[in-house]
Structure formats: structure tokens, C-alpha cells
Image: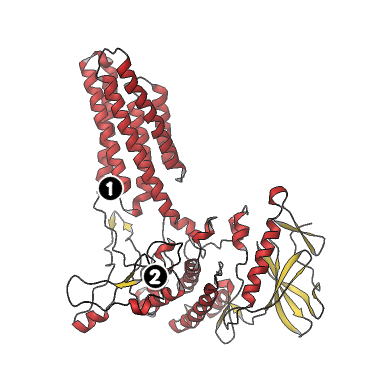
């Protein structure tokens, strides 16, 4: 019992279609690929065995058994059905740049796919062999055939899901062929304990890290293909998508390559790779035709790029939409297109000058996106300049909290509500808390997206601190300590969906307490009739601001995930 490949010289198949196992080409989390000999036609073939590591084991030397039990017992069988169905679809393709399926059969309680064995070396090995960056011509000879192959596959509702340098074979003629399609990977991922069964770090898009397969589509293969070309041009793949979602350190090729190197590549080619590497699926080209439109310069799209901050100063950003060349003819020829939510292309008009010719008639069919993605696929992006002074605003909110804390301590020192100065201090504390809460809520909704993570953490922490200070005049020390501890936890623990959910829970609890205070103010005798109503109204307002901040943080979290 264990995860081991078939022994050498094992005979697979039946009747006249028999194959002898020679060696293992590559084991993986999803299956094992063998080099075998077709005994009928005396030729080499590749055989892919359905063998998901987490759901199966080999009983003895050949037979595979499901390792799942109970309600999960059918995971292995479901995956096998997906494997067989997708193999049958792949077998229908007769494309020069797609590996050909020549047989399919079941044996040893699993399924096998027989593929033509492609002579040549992987793109990864080819890049290592040439020992330099590939030329524009060499990249064109690789990228264009792969785009043609993917266009055919996508038209049948299939997606590769595992494009990377080791899954592209470069034939001796220099032409590429796409191998190792991701049959049934999405099903395995849904029930897998490790993401490695489906994700290839650096090449897989962020939506492939989730269980929602509806987020995946042609745009996912475009990301992986763009990452593959990016790796060929720079010598290393982009950062893995999960890390990029927290902090995107991937600079566009215009910033990564030296000017002398960059000049060797077409600007439209470089822009297309950048567009394909955008994190959000809706920001990428939605299909191969849309990607080609950028690649060939038919649609002019600038990379989504926020200048990195260095030594406290941001470098000047490139304009998102390039300025049309001078001259009426040049202006008319300079089209800066955007995709509308329906997928049509419309030409952007300059603020002055002659009207531009619409490119809708030429590219509308090329860029129509699938129903799952409702937003525009590619659109000129104005470099995001925030009008909200984030740093001064944080200082202001910190000062407001300091004033509130000082006032609360003063309230305690002068004797509480029995002293007029104590009541005045409490009112000042409330005013400071409201100011801090209002500023933080505005920060979450108005700050730049690149600051969204930091702003969200600051808003959650300051909301908790405000609530901690609030409880001081009421002498409820446990609540003050609890809220202060929550503020520390928001800052120190890794940011995630728990932040808005926790903050929303705190807000709802405090709304209930505020309602109770207001009820007590009307039904009990107080030495100062103003104190309890004021504190109740203030708490309700603070809780409402905290709730708004929580909902805004949740919205940003959803935007990051997609």
C-alpha cells in the first residue's frame, strides 16, 4: 500500500492496443505520467494515469483503491468520471499545438489516457539551454501557436488550468505544443487538503486558489500564459498570486527590464503581458481574441501600475492613456479603447480634436466576456491619485483619541458626574471619539486601493480604541481592557475576513448596549439627567460608525479576493 508508480514492463491495455511501461516521466499530486511503448505500432507514447494522491493508494503493485471513507467515498469515482469525460473531449481536438489523445481505457480500477509522445524539450529546459533572454521573434513563435491552441480549447468550454514552462514542449522545429491539461483538477481541489494539487506558484492566478470554480475561465489561462512569457523575459516567474494580493511587488515589464533590453520587444507585446497578469479576473482580457487585440496593438491599454513609494516619495506615474501624436491623421489613428460591461469596445475621445473612429465593428466579437464576469475586462486606467490625505488624517484621528482619553481620565479625576467639570470632560471625550470614528470610516471608503489593507487595519484598531475609551467614564474597566485587547489583536494578527466580521459583531453588541442606556435614562432617576442620554446617543453613533467601517472593510476584502 502506498503512493508508488507502476513497475517497469507492466502491460496496460487490452486486445491489440497494448502498451508496455518503460519509465516515469513525471509524478504529480493529480496523477502519474509514464513513457511507454505502443506494442502494436512500435512507437513511444505517453500514458497519464488517474491517481490523485490524497484520495487513492496502490493496493499491491498495480490496482488503485480509493482511500476516502463515509460521505467522501465517491470523491475518487467522481474524479475518474471527470478525467474520462475531459479526455474524450480532448481527443476530439486535431490541432498542431495541442497534444493528441490516441486512446483511453480503464484498468486496475482507474483510468488511463494515451497521448502522442512529443519529441523535444520543455520550455523550461529550452530557456535554460539557450542561456539568454529569447528574442521577440522566438517569443512570437511560441506565443502565437499557444494562443491558437487555447482559442480552440476555450471554444469547447475547456480550460487548461496548469500552463507553465514545464507544460509546454518545444519541438525540434521550434514550434510549441501544449501538454498536461488539468482534467478534473477543479473537483480534486474542492476536496483536497493541500492546494498544491491544483496550484502552481507563480503561474496560477488568484482565483485558482479558491474553491469557487465559477471564478475561473479563459482569463485564468491568460494569466498563466502571461506569467510563463514573463518568466521567459525576466528569468523568473512573478510572485505567487496569493502573496501579490497582500502586497503586489510585481512591477510591469517596463519597470523590470533595462531600457536596452526593453527596446528589443514590441510595446504592444509588453502591454499585453502586463494586462494578462492583472490580479483581478475582470481586469484581464476575457478571452484570447481580446488578448490578441492588445498584443497586436489594436487596443491601447496601459498597465495597471501605482508608482512604488521610495524614501517617502512616489515616482511620477506614466499617464494611463497615452497622448495622441500631433497631427489630425495621427490623432485619428490613435485609438484608446475600453471595454464596456457588456463586452463591447468603444473608442475613448480626447478632450479636443477630431472624433475618433470606433473600433467596435472590428473587435466587439473579439472581446465579449462570459456571463460570470460582470465588469469591464480591460479599460484604460487613470493612475489612482487619492484626494484623501491619509497620513494627516491618521494623525488627526490619533489626536482625537488622545483628547478623548485625556478627557475621560480628567472625568475620573474630578469626581464624575457630581462635578460640573467632570460632565464637561465626558462631553469632550464623546466629541473626540465621534471625530475619530467619523474620520476612520471615511478613510476606509476614500483611501487609495493600494492603502486599503493598512487603512482597514487602522480603522478596526481605532474603532476598538474608541470603544475602550468610551467605557472609562462609566467605570467599566473590563470592557475597556477587552476593547483595548481587540485593538491590539487587529494590529498584530494577520489581516483576513475575521477583521470585518469581528468588528461588525462588536458594533452590534454596542448598539444593543446603547439602546439599553437610553431606556435606563428614561426609566431611572439620575443626578444629572443629561449624562446617560448623552452617553447612550454617543455610543449608538460610535457603534454605527464601527458598523459602517466593518462593512467597508468587508467590501474591500471581497475586491481583493476577486
Pointer 1 residue:
390
Instruction: Report the disc number at residue 557.
Output: none
Report if residue 184 is visible in the image: yes
Asked if 202 appears above or below 328 in the picture, the reply is above
Asked if 444 appears above or below 216 in the picture, the reply is above
429 sits left or right of 70 in the view: left
Q: Nearer the viewer, residue 153 or 559?
A: 153
SS category of the residue bearing label 2: helix
Q: Nearer the viewer, residue 266 or 289?
A: 289
Instruction: Report the disc number at residue 253.
Output: 2
The residue sitting at 79% across, 72% down in the picture is 8
The residue sitting at 29% across, 20% down in the picture is 532
The residue sitting at 29% across, 29% down in the picture is 538
User: Which part of the image, by quadrant, shows the N terminus?
Assistant: bottom right
Q: CA distance from mark 2 to mark 1?
A: 29 Å
Q: Nearer the viewer, mark 2 or mark 1?
A: 1
Q: Earlier in the sequence, mark 2 or mark 1?
A: 2
Estimate the x, y position of residue 122 in percent, counting from the top left.
59, 76
254 sits left or right of 239 in the view: left
Crowd tier of the residue under label 2, counting other residues whose Cα lies within 10 Å: few below 14, some 14–19, many 20 or above = some
Amino acid at each position: 500500500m502506498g503512493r508508488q508508480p507502476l513497475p517497469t514492463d507492466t502491460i496496460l491495455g487490452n486486445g491489440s492496443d497494448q502498451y508496455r511501461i518503460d519509465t516515469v516521466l513525471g509524478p504529480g499530486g493529480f496523477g502519474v505520467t509514464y513513457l511507454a511503448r505502443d506494442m502494436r505500432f512500435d512507437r513511444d507514447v505517453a500514458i497519464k494515469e488517474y491517481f490523485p494522491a490524497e484520495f487513492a493508494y496502490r493496493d499491491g503493485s498495480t490496482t488503485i483503491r480509493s482511500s476516502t471513507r463515509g460521505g467522501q467515498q465517491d470523491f475518487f469515482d467522481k474524479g475518474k468520471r471527470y478525467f474520462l469525460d475531459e479526455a474524450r473531449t480532448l481527443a476530439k481536438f486535431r490541432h498542431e499545438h495541442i497534444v493528441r489523445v490516441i486512446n483511453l481505457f480503464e484498468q486496475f480500477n482507474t483510468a488511463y489516457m494515451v497521448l502522442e509522445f512529443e519529441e523535444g524539450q520543455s520550455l523550461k529546459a529550452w530557456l535554460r539551454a539557450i542561456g539568454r533572454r529569447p528574442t521577440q521573434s522566438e517569443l512570437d513563435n511560441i506565443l502565437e501557436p499557444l494562443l491558437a491552441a487555447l482559442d480552440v480549447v476555450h471554444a469547447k468550454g475547456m480550460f487548461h488550468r496548469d500552463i507553465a514552462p514545464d507544460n509546454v514542449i518545444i519541438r525540434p522545429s521550434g514550434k510549441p505544443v501544449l501538454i498536461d491539461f488539468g482534467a478534473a483538477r477543479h473537483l480534486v481541489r474542492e476536496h483536497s487538503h493541500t492546494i498544491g494539487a491544483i496550484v502552481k506558484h507563480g503561474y496560477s492566478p488568484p482565483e485558482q486558489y479558491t474553491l469557487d470554480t465559477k471564478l475561473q475561465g479563459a482569463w485564468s489561462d491568460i494569466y498563466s500564459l502571461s506569467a510563463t512569457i514573463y518568466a521567459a523575459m525576466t528569468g523568473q516567474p512573478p510572485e505567487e498570486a496569493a502573496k501579490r494580493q497582500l502586497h503586489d511587488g510585481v512591477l510591469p515589464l517596463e519597470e523590470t527590464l533595462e531600457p536596452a533590453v526593453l527596446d528589443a520587444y514590441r510595446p504592444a507585446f509588453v502591454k499585453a503581458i502586463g494586462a494578462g497578469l492583472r490580479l483581478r479576473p475582470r481586469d484581464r482580457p476575457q478571452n484570447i481574441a481580446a488578448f490578441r487585440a492588445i498584443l497586436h496593438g489594436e487596443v491601447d491599454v496601459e498597465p495597471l501600475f501605482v508608482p512604488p513609494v521610495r524614501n517617502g516619495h512616489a515616482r511620477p506615474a506614466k499617464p494611463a492613456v497615452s497622448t495622441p501624436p500631433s497631427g489630425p491623421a495621427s490623432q485619428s489613428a490613435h485609438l484608446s479603447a475600453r471595454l464596456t460591461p457588456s463586452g463591447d469596445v468603444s473608442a475613448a475621445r480626447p478632450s479636443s480634436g477630431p472624433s475618433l473612429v470606433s473600433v467596435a465593428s472590428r473587435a466587439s466579437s473579439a472581446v465579449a466576456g462570459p456571463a460570470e464576469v460582470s465588469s469591464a475586462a480591460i479599460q484604460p486606467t487613470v493612475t489612482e491619485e487619492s484626494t484623501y490625505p491619509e497620513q494627516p488624517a491618521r494623525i488627526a484621528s490619533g489626536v482625537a483619541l488622545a483628547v478623548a482619553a485625556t478627557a475621560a481620565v480628567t472625568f475620573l479625576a474630578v469626581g464624575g458626574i457630581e462635578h460640573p467639570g467632570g460632565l464637561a470632560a465626558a462631553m469632550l471625550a464623546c466629541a473626540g471619539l465621534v471625530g475619530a470614528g467619523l474620520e476612520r470610516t471615511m478613510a476606509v471608503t476614500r483611501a487609495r486601493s493600494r492603502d486599503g489593507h493598512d487603512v482597514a487595519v487602522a480603522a478596526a484598531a481605532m474603532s476598538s480604541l474608541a470603544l475602550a475609551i468610551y467605557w472609562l467614564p462609566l467605570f467599566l474597566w473590563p470592557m475597556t481592557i477587552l476593547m483595548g485587547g481587540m485593538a491590539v489583536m487587529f494590529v498584530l494578527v494577520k489581516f483576513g475576513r475575521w477583521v470585518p466580521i469581528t468588528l461588525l459583531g462588536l458594533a452590534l453588541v454596542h448598539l444593543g448596549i446603547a439602546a439599553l442606556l437610553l431606556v435606563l435614562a428614561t426609566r431611572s432617576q439620575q443626578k444629572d439627567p443629561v449624562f446617560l442620554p448623552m452617553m447612550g446617543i454617543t455610543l449608538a453613533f460610535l457603534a454605527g460608525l464601527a458598523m459602517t467601517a466593518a462593512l467597508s472593510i468587508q467590501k474591500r476584502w471581497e475586491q481583493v479576493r476577486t
